[in-house]
Image (tube, rainbow, N blue to C red):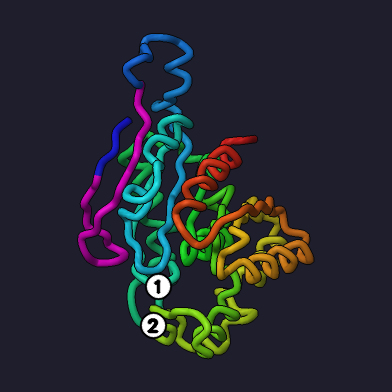
């Protein structure tokens, strides 16, 4: 396994940025000359790739530091890519950076040009936790031609509802709502609303497959139950799972394995 930090200049964000990238390589007990091993490491045709998004207060190092993603990616022969977004919900901000453009256009193009990943939509995935759970669905639903599957772990999936909770003080809010969204009071039914985005994808005949998981002790559990019902009412293709756990890495480290297995299942 090759695990590396890559620094490069992003023309979208207009600054140097850091990425963490995991590329599976043959281990000591494998022989690259073996035909089956060569098929597992399809560098010429391109390996499947997952873009992993962090939550609030996190950055590109979160997955490497707090989960066993290196081993999980190696075992499944999948490339994993991690970049930072700050506390900005993966948006093209009203006043700030263009993160949606970066994560859906520039970053996949850069990764495909440098690393041995597949250029096919059906091999390109995105997953995240908490704020990144919203971000994973948002990026996939706003650019369904890029991502075939998207997974949310403990996601803040109702962005309009989260804003209302932030206003009332019932949840922590490290977010600059006006800078990110312009007028956050109009989020419901907008192109930032996951339910509206899914309806648009459905109308256009191209929607990614979705995965959703949340711990039963998570403070976002009720929001996830409500989101599950709203997506079901839309006829969305969502695999839902839940289990004991809170809003923490004990839960996410278990469920990212389920996510990767789901992504790699045809």
215 or 27: which is nearer to us? 215
Left or right of 171? Residue 208 is right
Residue 210 rendering spot, x and y as whole percentages: 63, 53
Q: Residue at x 65, y 70 (%)?
A: 222
List the residue tagged with mark 2: 176
Q: Residue at x 21, y 51 (%)?
A: 7
**Is residue 199 a member of the stretch shown in magenta?**
no
**Image quarter of the C terminus:** top right
What secondary structure is marked by label 2? loop
In 3D space, how far apart are the residues under numbered discs 2 and 1 (Cα atoms)?
8 Å
**Image quarter of the N terminus:** top left
Left or right of 214? Residue 51 is left
List the residue tagged with mark 1: 88
**Is residue 25 a member of the stretch shown in magenta?**
yes
Magenta part, dominant SS? strand
Q: Residue at x 24, y 46 (%)?
A: 5
Residue 191 rendering spot, x and y as whole percentages: 57, 74
Give yes or no for contact between labels 2 and 1 (Cβ–Cβ under 8 Å): yes
Task: Examine the image and state in which quarter residue 85 appears.
Answer: bottom left
141 or 150: which is nearer to us? 150
Which stretch appears magenta? 5-26
């Amino acid at each position: 396994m090759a695990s590396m930090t890559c620094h490069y200049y992003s023309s979208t964000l207009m600054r140097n940025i850091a990425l963490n990238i995991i590329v599976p390589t043959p281990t000591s007990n494998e022989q690259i000359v073996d035909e089956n091993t060569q098929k597992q490491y399809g560098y010429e045709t391109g390996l499947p790739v997952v873009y992993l998004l962090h939550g609030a207060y996190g950055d590109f190092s979160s997955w490497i530091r707090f989960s066993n993603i290196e081993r999980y990616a190696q075992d499944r022969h999948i490339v994993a890519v991690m970049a930072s977004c700050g506390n900005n919900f993966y948006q093209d901000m009203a006043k700030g950076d263009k993160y949606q453009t970066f994560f859906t256009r520039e970053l996949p193009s850069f990764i495909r040009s440098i690393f041995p990943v597949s250029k096919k939509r059906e091999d390109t995935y995105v997953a995240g936790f908490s704020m990144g759970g919203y971000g994973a669905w948002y990026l996939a639903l706003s650019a369904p031609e890029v991502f075939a599957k998207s997974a949310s772990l403990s996601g803040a999936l109702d962005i309009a509802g989260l804003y209302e909770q932030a206003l009332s003080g019932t949840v922590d809010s490290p977010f600059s709502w006006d800078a990110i969204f312009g007028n956050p009071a109009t989020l419901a039914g907008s192109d930032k609303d996951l339910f509206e985005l899914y309806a648009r994808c459905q109308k256009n005949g191209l929607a990614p497959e979705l995965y959703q998981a949340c711990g039963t002790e998570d403070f976002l559990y009720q929001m996830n139950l409500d989101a599950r019902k709203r997506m079901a009412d839309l006829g969305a293709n969502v695999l839902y799972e839940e289990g004991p756990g809170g809003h923490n890495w004990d839960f996410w480290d278990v469920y990212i394995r389920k996510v990767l297995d789901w992504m790699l299942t045809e």
